[in-house]
């Protein structure tokens, strides 16, 4: 049933795209350009393509809702975690940590010494060192 509704839904989508592309352009964005016939104007569209657009749009929304209802009925009582199998026989966080026994030796820790950088020569006490002026 769901496959049939999905096929009809896809055909409606293609037909809706074709009907919208066949319509005459009215200029500006959101139908505010040419002054007539759009959804924003005072009078409704009376062309056959306008009526077909409304009919296909309503049918598209109807099939969207029916697909949502069918999917909800099939997934009733089923969780995403149930599909993954988490919680039933999967490992828990405590199983992943190996306990340490008192007899087990600890792995050796390697510490590398880094050579010290040579210290900058210090100015003798009491000597004034000139500071260059800041660059403008």
Image (tube, rainbow, N blue to C red):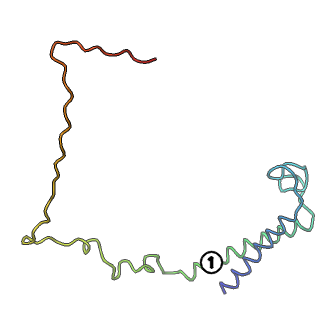
Residue 79 at x, y percent in the picture: 46, 77
User: Which residue is rendered at x = 83% and y = 56% of the image?
Assistant: 39
Q: Quadrant of residue 93?
A: bottom left
Count of numbered marks: 1
* Tag 1 residue: 69
Q: Quadrant of residue 107?
A: bottom left
Residue 62 at x, y percent in the picture: 72, 74
User: Which residue is rendered at x = 87% and y = 56% of the image?
Assistant: 25
* Residue situated in front as seen by the camera: 134 or 47: 134
Q: Which quadrant: the N terminus?
A: bottom right
* Residue situated in front as seen by the camera: 127 or 53: 127
Above or below, 105 relative to 110: below
Above or below, 23 relative to 135: below
User: Dot 1 surroundings within 10 Å: few (below 14), some, or many (20 or more)?
Assistant: few
Tell me the SS state at disc 1: helix
Instruction: Judge from the rendering whether residue 76 lies leftward or rightward of residue 109; answer left or right.
Output: right
Residue 83 at x, y percent in the picture: 45, 80
Q: Quadrant of residue 120?
A: top left
Residue 125 at x, y percent in the picture: 15, 16
Q: Residue furthest left?
A: 103
């Amino acid at each position: 049933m769901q496959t049939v509704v999905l096929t009809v839904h896809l055909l409606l989508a293609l037909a809706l795209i074709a009907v919208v592309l066949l319509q005459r352009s009215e200029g500006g964005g959101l139908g505010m350009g040419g002054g007539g016939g759009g959804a924003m104007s005072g009078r409704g569209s009376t062309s056959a393509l306008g009526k077909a657009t409304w009919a296909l749009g309503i049918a598209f929304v109807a099939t969207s809702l029916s697909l949502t209802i069918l999917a909800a009925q099939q997934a009733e009582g089923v969780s995403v975690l149930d599909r993954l199998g988490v919680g039933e026989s999967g490992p828990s966080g405590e199983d992943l940590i190996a306990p340490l026994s008192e007899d087990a030796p600890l792995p050796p820790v390697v510490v590398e010494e880094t050579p010290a950088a040579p210290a900058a020569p210090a100015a003798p006490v009491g000597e004034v060192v000139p500071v260059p002026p800041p660059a403008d």
